[in-house]
Each structure stands twice: as C-alpha cells, then as structure tokens.
Image: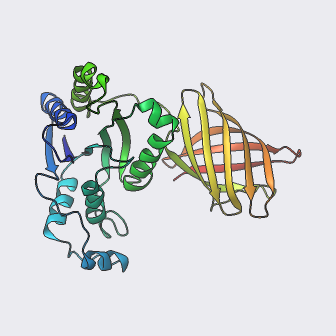
Amino acid sequence: MKVFIVYCHPSEDSFTKNMCDAFIKGITDSGNEYIISDLYKMGFHADMTEEEYLRDANYRDKPDVAADVLAEQEKINSADAIAFIYPVFWTEAPAKLVGWFDRVWSYGFAYGNKTMKMLEKGLILCSAGNSADRLDKLGLLGSMKKVMFGDRLFNRVKQTEFVVFDCTSRENEARETNWHSNLKKAYEKGKTLFSPSEKVFSLEDRYFTTVSNSETGEVSDQTIFSYHQKENVIWAEYSGGSIIKGFLLGTIDDNNNLHFDYRHINTEGESKSGECHSEPRFENGKLRFYEKWKWTSGCEGTSVIEEL
C-alpha cells in the first residue's frame, strides 16, 4: 500500500519536520510505501494563474493543466491514501498548502467529471502552538476539521482522521516534555495507517440532509445538518430551505439511537422547538436516521435524513 504525503513547512528546524520523519519511518517499518511532495523544498507555485482561474470558473475539463499540477494529480492517483502534514498558522494550513488545493483540486479532477480516485484514507497531522483543549473550546478545531473534511476531502476519501500535536510552540515547556511521546505517536500513525481496524461509530464531522418529512415538518432537502459527537453527547447545526438557523443537542445510546431537543428560527421569523428520537439504518451504502419528532406545541411527525 502507498501513501502520498503532502508536507508543508518553511523550516527544516521544526517539530513538524521531525514529526514528518517519524511518520515516514512508521510507514516504511510497516512494509508500506510513500511518495512525498515537500512543497517548500520543491518550490511549489501556490498562486493560481488567470488561465487556471478561467479554466475552472468556466468548468472546462480539458486535460490542459500545468505540468506541476498534473504531477501532483498523478501522485494522488498512484496512492491508496493521502496525508497532509503541516503547522497551524492562524487556524489554517500555510498559504502554500492552501494554494496547492486551489491549483491541484482542479475542475475535471477533484470535482465535476472527476478523474481523481476515491482514496481509502485521508489523514491530517498538524502541529499547533495552542492546546487541543483550547482550540476545541474556542471552536477553532471544529473550523479546521470542517474546512479539511467538509470541503477539501469531502467525498474524496473513505475514512478520515485529524490529529493535532499541540503545545509545540518554542516557548511552551510542554514542547520538550512531550517531544518523544509526540514523535512516537506520529510513528504509530504511520505504522498503523493501513492496519485493519474496527471502525468506531461516530457522528463527528458528518453531514446529512432530509429525504422525507411529514407535512407539518419544516426541514427539507435544502436543509443541511452538520453533526458532532463527543463520547455519548451529540449536537448539530442546521440551516437551509425554510430554516434560517437551528441547533440540536442530545445523546446517543449504545444502539446508536439519537435522543435530542431541537430549536430553530424559520424564514417567517418564528422560533420553533421540539424533541426527536432517531434510529440509524444503513441503506444503499449510506447512513440514514429514521426520526420521530414532536413539536413543543404537541404536533407530531416523522422524517428521514441521509448522510451526504
């Protein structure tokens, strides 16, 4: 098996470089292969040209991409998984990696009439100065995941994982204290990347839309639900169609049934709330939830949401 590593850091003297080296050693020690694009070292041109913009803006999928972009796309299609390794700069990847997505995720390759293969795994390994707990509480970690998984890797990889190596700024004492344990973790991520593992059911970073609803319901196929999960607690934001903004909060039980309260503001400016109980089913390779809900006013109904 082969992983394509997209590595992006401007300095060789960094924790991120050591993390990348440890990950690579894990890959090779497990008997697997890797190819790497070191974006700074190779001088990858991150700025999209006007010609590239007009090509994508006009949805032209003719095979006329630049040679350096074509080389990256060929690396992707030769691999079984992709790993992005980078430091967090202002809650985002470095500009050079963002530019890599701008150019390599071209029309006719990553979207439209896609020629990009469906990869088995997509792995993010990033170093951050802040603690993971702080990033989580401020909503920054969720934002990073949403950009990477909800947009860039969405429907392009089968399985995703986001790993933060936190407190790695040079003034943080934890940088040295956790140095060896963090590198060991990076090594293990490489060594076990292609190991078969039991997939734990989770709603974290999964998106759903409505496929059916009772007449008295308000969500529709224009409504998108963005779910999250931490242990047995689940929550989601939803909007679209007749919903301006909605939130739900509840729990997931041992059978993966959901029990939650919801509240939203509709386009009429009304605040509506209720409770819902949902049962999961896998149909045609997709996860669906069959829901029974009840407005606070007493009106009841059923709906079905399906994963995007």
Give the left or right position of residue 128, taking residue 39 as reference.
right
Which residue corresponds to the image point at 81% horizontal and 43% vertical from the top-left?
294
Q: Residue 164 appears at what percent x and percent y?
A: 35, 34
Can residue 116 be seen here? The reply is: no
Question: Hey, which quadrant is residue 190 in on the image?
Answer: top left
Q: Which of the two residues, 136 or 27, is positioned nearer the viewer here?
A: 136
Q: Residue 26 appears at what percent x and percent y?
A: 17, 29
Can residue 139 be seen here? The reply is: yes
Give the left or right position of residue 271, taking residue 70 as reference.
right
Say how the picture is coloured.
rainbow
The N terminus lies in quadrant: top left
Give the left or right position of residue 93, taking residue 32 as reference.
right
Which residue corresponds to the image point at 89% horizontal and 44% vertical from the top-left?
298
In the displayed structure, 47 sits above or below 17; it is below
> Seen from this angle, which residue lies furthest right?
298
Total residue callouts: 0
Q: Residue 194 appears at what percent x and percent y?
A: 26, 34
Which residue corresponds to the image point at 14% horizontal and 61% vertical from the top-left?
71
Q: Which of the two residues, 13 or 74, is positioned nearer the viewer here?
A: 13
Which residue corresponds to the image point at 67% horizontal and 46% vertical from the top-left?
247
Q: Residue 20 appears at what percent x and percent y?
A: 19, 37
Q: Which of the two residues, 107 or 133, is positioned nearer the viewer here?
A: 133
Question: Hey, which quadrant is residue 48 in on the image?
Answer: bottom left
Question: Hey, which quadrant is residue 97 in on the image?
Answer: bottom left
Q: Which of the two residues, 245 or 119, is positioned nearer the viewer here?
A: 245
